[in-house]
Image (cartoon, grey):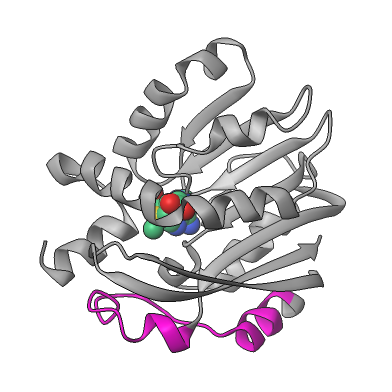
Amino acid sequence: MKPRILASQLRCPSGTEALDVALKMNEANRLLNQKCIDLLQLKSGDSLLEIGPGNGAFVADIIKVAENISYTGLDWSDDMVVEAQRLNEYWVKQGRAQFQQGSSEHLPFATGLFNKVLTVHTLYFWEKPSDHLAQIRRVMKPAGLFCIAFGDSSFMKELPFVPYGFNLYDEAEACALLRSSGFRVVTTVHHQERGLSNTGDLVDKIINIIICEA
Ligand SMILES: C[S@@+](CC[C@H](N)C(=O)[O-])C[C@H]1O[C@@H](n2cnc3c(N)ncnc32)[C@H](O)[C@@H]1O
């Protein structure tokens, strides 16, 4: 796939390529997502919102951590919402998971609804990240935990699809952004992994995981 097309599919998987791109993302991002789920310290009764779950491949890993976790996934790709619902039909029927189309720029949820929020590899696509972060903080309960993970600019800038619409951040820039949006940074973790990129090439990934309190 040409870098420009891959970039637009990573931003918003859609059309005939979407399901294949989503499967490749699952493979490329599995370890990272599992680490983020661990860091969220999920417990019984938690209500979690995920921004940009793609096809929702890791939803069962979230729900199975403890009893009574309720999961909401919001993705701006219609095709991903449909596929996430299909792959997680069991959890949707149980009333434990729901998926909606929408953007974190205008979250369609009541204030103070969630005590955990997760988003992995989405920050690059946000035109005005402070608007998204303000909305995320609004829908969180006080002292709820927000986990945001993204590739460090030092590593991302080498990837061939990045010139086509990706905004890059290092840890310090993202922490500053989070603090100016009212979050308290609790911990930052550097996830390093030699693994497949979305291009199918083997790369040494440097990913920042930031855990903060609303
Ligand atoms: C690069 S993929 C990452 C998918 C998944 N989180 C993972 O780790 O493999 C980005 C996904 O987030 C969605 N997305 C990005 N920004 C979003 C936003 N602000 N609101 C809703 N969905 C968003 C895209 O449609 C896409 O499905």
Residue at 25 percent of width and 56 percent of height: 9
Residue at 35 percent of width and 74 percent of height: 203
Q: Is residue 182 visible?
A: no
Residue 156 location (% of width, % of height): 39, 80
* Residue 98 located left or right of residue 89: right
Which portion, as a residue range, is magenta? 153-178
Quadrant the C terminus occupies: bottom right
- Residues 68 and 49: in front is 68
Residue at 65 percent of width and 57 percent of height: 135
Residue 93 location (% of width, % of height): 54, 10
Residue at 66 percent of width and 29 percent of height: 63
- Residues 82 and 107: in front is 82
* Residue 179 located left or right of residue 174: right
* Residue 173 located left or right of residue 123: right
Residue 140 location (% of width, % of height): 77, 49
Question: Where, by quadrant of the figure, is residue 65 drawn?
Answer: top right
Asked whether residue 166 is drawn in magenta, I would say yes
Q: Is residue 82 visible?
A: yes
